[in-house]
Image (cartoon, rainbow, N blue to C red):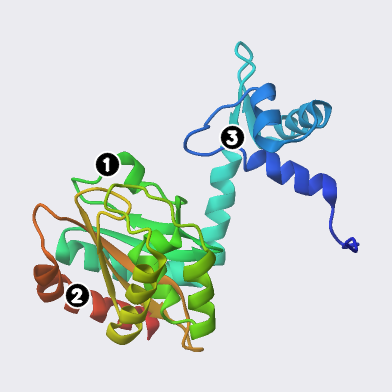
Amino acid sequence: MKQNSLHVGTLAKGLRLLRAFDESHVSLTLTELVERTGLEKSAVQRMAHTLHVEGMLDRDPDTRRYRPSHAWLELAYVYYWSDPLISHALPKLIEFSRTVGETVNLAQMSGDHIIYALRLPNHRTHFAASIVGRRVPALSTASGRVMLATRSEAEYREACATWPLPAATPLTITDRAVVEDDVIAARRNGYTITEGQVLLNEISLAVPIIGTDGRADAAVQVSLSSLTYDFDRVRHEILPVLLDTTASIQG
């Protein structure tokens, strides 16, 4: 295969090393970095040292474990300023969150996953569900399915057939035909409601934020307790307000 002359292999390896950190691997030794990246130990040692010197990784002098530094927060800060949707949507989502009193998220499509770019928790929200930047397989989420519903038939069919679909809970639907039917229903209805797909006892309602080209790369999602709500109540009490909110963001 022909090499891309613009691709910098060393930089790509450095980024692979940074991506070795996630919510289950918040600090790593050199040996663990080698295992998670598949790179040679000497290369990992040089890159980890360089990233530490450049301020991207902190290193514990006693355990010699590396962890992300505050520089990652600085990059997130820049991202928020760079994305006009964030600044436009935030005040409207704050108002919506105060109106319904429930957890509200702004999700964006990120490859075959969705990523939470804004999260407005309520008093019941646990820590993991309040942090921005979490990535979840798109097919498992109401947000991912409702965004896919704005794609062409060929695109959403391919996604439903090939994108990852892990079972996060005993209720997660892993039958791809059923997921595709849900996407088709979202095309017709303009929203998606799921239950227990990522978290048990959670009902998730999502409406797409549709761009001028008719496609959605973002969606507003509301997280509700299935101990308090059922689908009919969600449609009656929450959906109309959410539709108004997303319309105001699109406008």
Q: Quadrant of residue 65?
A: top right
**Which type of secondary structure does the marked residue at label 3 adopt?**
loop
Residue 193 x %, y %: 25, 68
Instruction: Between label 3 and label 2, give the one nearer the viewer.
Output: 2
Look at the image and tell me in which quarter the N terminus lies: bottom right
Q: Quadrant of residue 175?
A: bottom left
* Residue nearest the observer in this picture, 15 or 2: 2
**Which type of secondary structure does the marked residue at label 1 adopt?**
loop
* Residue nearest the observer in this picture, 4 or 98: 4
What residue sits 35% from the left and 42% below the top? 128
The mark that comes first in sequence, 3 or 1, is 3
Q: CA distance from mark 3 to mark 1?
A: 24 Å
Identify the residue at the far bottom of this view.
213
What residue sits 36% from the left and 48% below the top? 168
Look at the image and tell me in which quarter the C terminus lies: bottom left
Q: CA distance from mark 3 to mark 2?
A: 40 Å
User: How many residues crowd mark 1 within 10 Å: few (<14), some (14–19), many (20+)?
Assistant: few
Mark 3: amino acid: Ser
Relative horizontal placement of residue 5, taking residue 107 as reference (left or right): right
What residue sits 32% from the left and 79% below the top? 186
The mark that comes first in sequence, 1 or 2, is 1
Residue 200 x %, y %: 24, 48
According to the picture, the residue beneath numbered tag 3 turns out to be 69
According to the picture, the residue beneath numbered tag 1 turns out to be 126
Q: How many marks?
A: 3
**Which type of secondary structure does the marked residue at label 2 adopt?**
helix
Mark 2: amino acid: Leu
Q: Is residue 4 above or below residue 25?
A: below
The mark that comes first in sequence, 3 or 2, is 3
Residue 4 x %, y %: 87, 63
According to the picture, the residue beneath numbered tag 2 turns out to be 239
